[in-house]
Image (tube, rainbow, N blue to C red):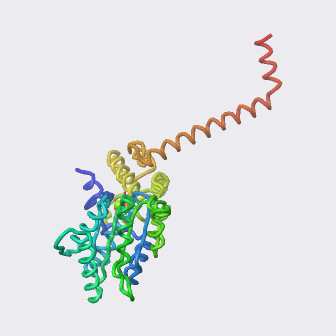
Amino acid sequence: MDYLEFFDLKEDPFRLTPDPSYFYPSESHNEVLSSLTYMVEQKEGFFLAVGEPGTGKTTLLNTFLNTKGWKDKAGIALVLTPRLSPEEFLLTVLEDLNVKIKNTNKNEIIRAFRDFLVENSMLGRRIIIIVDEAQSLPDETLEEMRLLSNLETEKEKLLQIVLIGQPELRKRLLSEKLRQLNQRITLRVILNPLTVKETSDYINYRLIKAGKGSVIFKENAKELIHKASKGIPRLINLISSRSLMAAYLDTGKHIKKRHVLYAMRHLSDSCAKKEYWTATVRLSILVFILFCALASAIAINYKEYIIQIMGLFFR
Ligand SMILES: Nc1ncnc2c1ncn2[C@@H]1O[C@H](COP(=O)(O)OP(=O)(O)OP(=O)(O)O)[C@@H](O)[C@H]1O
Ligand SMILES: [Mg+2]
């Protein structure tokens, strides 16, 4: 019997794919999703969302595109490999939007793009460029995007740009070189990790999506998962998945703290493992301090006897 069968689950609840059907709307995820929707609806120019690795940026994007239906409601160029030069970037965007160009002369490309934007604007159709992993965009390509965002009529922006990336992107945008682009960002949001309560709900939510089954994560096990993962969904998935495996090997349906500790020990090179060793070092220091305190208390209370005993030896 494999472990999914053992737990009566239809599928693996803690897969690492950014699957929108598993999207859990935490307060922060909800806020970013609503801001993104608002930005598109209001035809704001530039949107920036940043979050630590594994917080769910790509999952959120997929939810926006598929579940919220924007894939059909707007013309969207989705750039997933942003290490592109300005020219490569432009060509990728045009290809995604199905804009035909006669030659690859840059002026010609920009002209064709502008015509396309004006046509769509007249039809009331929004055109959006979305860049995931935007922290990897070279400065020159970011600058090219700024120039593209200048394409507008007297009344409205012709193009909306969404940048999603890791927190270093925000720092880069503060640099002198990218100051002008930074000023154009109309809406910026941060995707935060989950709270303790959300981590617990998130685990239950994923289990329900995967068929509920007969698994029960003990509350203190979930608290430990939150502590080890710092509320980052990718790490929660990794630890929870390993903990399930540990319980399966134990032939138990309850996930206990010891299963989580087992998972943390066996996860290589991740925050979870760091957290495990930090906890171990902290505990050793605490034991050492307690030992010293106890030894000092004994030494103070029984000073006379100790001096007498030492005297016997060193006479
Ligand atoms: N709100 C959420 N609901 C359900 N699953 C989530 C959520 N957020 C993240 N996850 C899960 O966490 C994992 C990592 O998510 P994702 O790949 O979207 O993170 P990311 O922020 O894009 O990471 P990176 O910075 O490395 O690209 C995936 O397995 C995904 O299913
Ligand atoms: Mg991602």
Q: Residue at x 46, y 76 (%)?
A: 186
Q: Residue at x 44, y 48 (%)?
A: 272
289 over 118 or under it: above or below: above
104 over 252 or under it: above or below: below
Q: Position of residue 52 (x, y in %)?
A: 44, 59
The quarter holding residue 130 reads: bottom left
The quarter holding residue 281 reads: top right
Q: Position of residue 85 (x, y in %)?
A: 30, 60
Q: Give 15 or 252, whichever is nearer the viewer.
A: 15
Q: From where the camera sits, is residue 268 visible?
A: yes
Q: Residue at x 27, y 74 (%)?
A: 110
Q: Position of residue 208 (x, y in %)?
A: 34, 66
Q: Position of residue 147 (x, y in %)?
A: 37, 72
Query: Which image quarter has ligand 2?
Result: bottom left
247 lies left or right of 273: left
Q: Give 8 or 241, whichever is nearer the viewer.
A: 241
Q: From where the camera sits, is residue 204 visible?
A: no
Q: Give 133 or 240, whichever is nearer the viewer.
A: 133
135 lies left or right of 297: left
Q: How many marks?
A: 0
The quarter holding residue 114 reads: bottom left
Quarter of the rendering occupied by the C terminus: top right
Q: Residue furthest right?
A: 304
17 lies left or right of 43: left
Q: Residue furthest top?
A: 315
